[in-house]
Image (cartoon, rainbow, N blue to C red):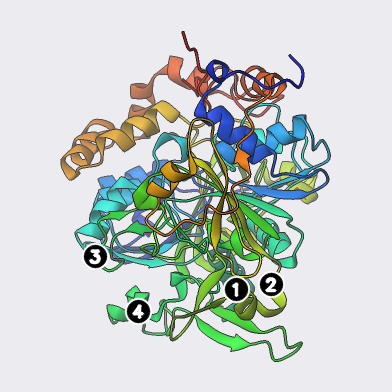
Amino acid sequence: MGREYANPEEYGLADLLCCAASREVQDNEIVFAGTGLPMVAIMLAQKTHAPNLKLIFEAGTLDGRPPAIPTSVGDARCEMGASRASGLYDAFSIAQRGYVDLGFLGGAEVDEYGNVNTTCIGDYLNPELRLTGSGGNPDINSFAKRTVFIMVHEKRRFTPNVSYITSPGWRVKKWPEGDFVHRRELYGAAYRGGPSAVISTAGVFRFDGETGRIYLDTCHPGKTPQEITEMCHFDLDISRVSGETLPPTREELHFIHDVLDPEQIFIPKVTKG
Amino acid sequence: MGTGKRITLQQAAEIIKDGSSLTFSGFTIWRRPMAIVFELIRQQRRGLHLIEVNGGPHTEFLVGAGCVDIWESCWVGHELYGKYGANLSRKVGNKEIIVEDYSHAEMMFRFAAGAAGAPYAVTQTSLGTDIHNPEYDMLGRAGKRDGKRIPKHKYLFTDDPFYGAGPQVLVPAAKADIAIMCVQQVGEEGTVRVNGQYYSDPEAARTADITIVMAEEIVPEEYLRREADRNTITSFEVDYIVECPYGAHPTGMFGRYDVDGAFLKDFYGRTRTQEGFDDFAKEWIMGLDHLGYLEKLGWPRMLTLKANTALNYSTGVKRGQ
């Protein structure tokens, strides 16, 4: 087992995403996580390279150490071993106060500046499909120093203009006119940072520190930069590709499947012939 | 000692009139007052205005049954067991319902302001998003902003006048006629003890004019007052109490029973059309009372959901593949 990398037939795409996301976490960070894959990724980081990370769930558990994977941030499992079980007012106040280093979020659409949509598909006033709505997505993305998005990669989801900006990226709208400005300009004293990575089912994307524009960093095994360019509706910057996304280690796979999600709630176990 | 606060499930639903504004306890699929929600559907309540920190299965049931005209909140779905609110989505598409979108923190801060008797809260969240797009003020577009229950503006911008911290968003206090809570224990005089996370329950209860608490059990008030530091909501903030074991099913109750994921999955799958919803309501709501509903669920199912008293969740429930 140990730290050697697994062979392609030993893991699935969900494993790869989970491990890539987990590696975004640094030890001792305060991390705010949403339900699903982000939860598994953070708990994996806690088991491997970041044993001292502090976990906040927006329903109100602060620094919890759940023994079993919760199916919601409101789950009874979240508060096992927590420093404090409280409520949403505390969780969001802590975020607004600036304690949160890293947020893990999902999204239905993303644009080239990291604006994310979870509200509706199509014209907001005549939507084709109403989605869940914002939840805490804009709040975490407003207040955390970095945010990481985990997304399914489809061409229609990587778009120059999201249907609705639910969650703020690097270039955001300044109302009432709605002109695009750099996030730093709008957030003033509340500015701490913004989206740092998008981990899609095709690759890992990052954002230029100055312009806030997205670029491809690594391609998942088996994908080429050209293929991934074809999977984006905007003009993707592939000039900074650093290589392939590192596969899961056997140790990481052990934690995911034997310790964190043995019930296969979020991550199916791959059995390849 | 009786205080006259104890009422039945039917009486609790009767307090809620057509056109009432309502808010609820709980978080997404946890501690939602489902038994009262089902009773409201049986009583065919109409024109409700839901104002919630976040929505969940209770929202989807009320919306699907045609009880709701206005929904102000930030999120609706069934978590792992249903990716979004299919009934709300359908009714938004058909323009049968007005939806006003805020962010989760904005809703929370709106409730905190309501609970504190303040007219508004100030925050820096969600700057730059379409939540603040003036074209998307749906209650304004519908001419509903009367400055009474519905604030004159969706939000306002200001610059910090005290420390020069830059742009701020003023969000109006939440106001609701009635809060319906679902908790583990309430005392005879109304003191509430929530076990586990209390989500936004204290603010929701305090924001509303009338607070109805449905509890797994009504316990001697004196018992709760022995350890007042463990209590969540004071006796005088609560107007009515209802005893209703398993009243949160199919949502979960910390320490008592887990979320019934199979039930929610079935609901989500079947109620993506109106016909499907009507069929589901005919099967699970209409013609039943709470005991009839529990009888239909049956003991084996309820025992599987029962929480382990040391862990506070069920170890028997099947959650994954």
- Residue B12 marker: none
**Separation of marks 1 and 2 at Cα, in angstroms:** 8 Å
Residue A244 image-quadrant placement:
top right
Q: Is residue B246 above or below residue A35?
A: above
Q: Is residue B166 above or below residue A31?
A: below
Chain letter for mark 3: A
| Tag 4 and tag 1, C-beta contact below 8 Å | no
Chain letter for mark 1: A
- Residue B135 marker: 4
Residue annotated with mark 3: A126
Question: What is the crowding at mark 3: few (fewer than 14 residues within 10 Å), some, or many (at least 20)?
Answer: some
Residue annotated with mark 1: A183
Q: Position of residue B250 (x, y in %)?
A: 43, 34
Q: Earlier in the sequence, mark 1 or mark 3?
A: 3
Chain letter for mark 4: B
**Separation of marks 4 and 1 at Cα, in angstroms:** 21 Å
Q: Nearer the viewer, residue B95 or B15?
A: B95
Residue B57 image-quadrant placement:
top left
Q: In screen coordinates, is B170 left or right of A132?
A: right
Q: Can residue A76 be seen here?
A: no
| Tag 1 and tag 2, C-beta contact below 8 Å | yes
Q: Residue at x 58, y 66 (%)?
A: A212
Q: Is residue A83 above or below residue A250?
A: below
Depth check, mark 1 against mark 3: the one in front is: 1
Q: Position of residue B109 (x, y in %)?
A: 60, 68
Q: Secondary structure at mark 2?
A: loop
Q: Nearer the viewer, residue B161 or A138?
A: A138
Q: Position of residue A18 (x, y in %)?
A: 60, 34
Depth check, mark 2 against mark 4: the one in front is: 2
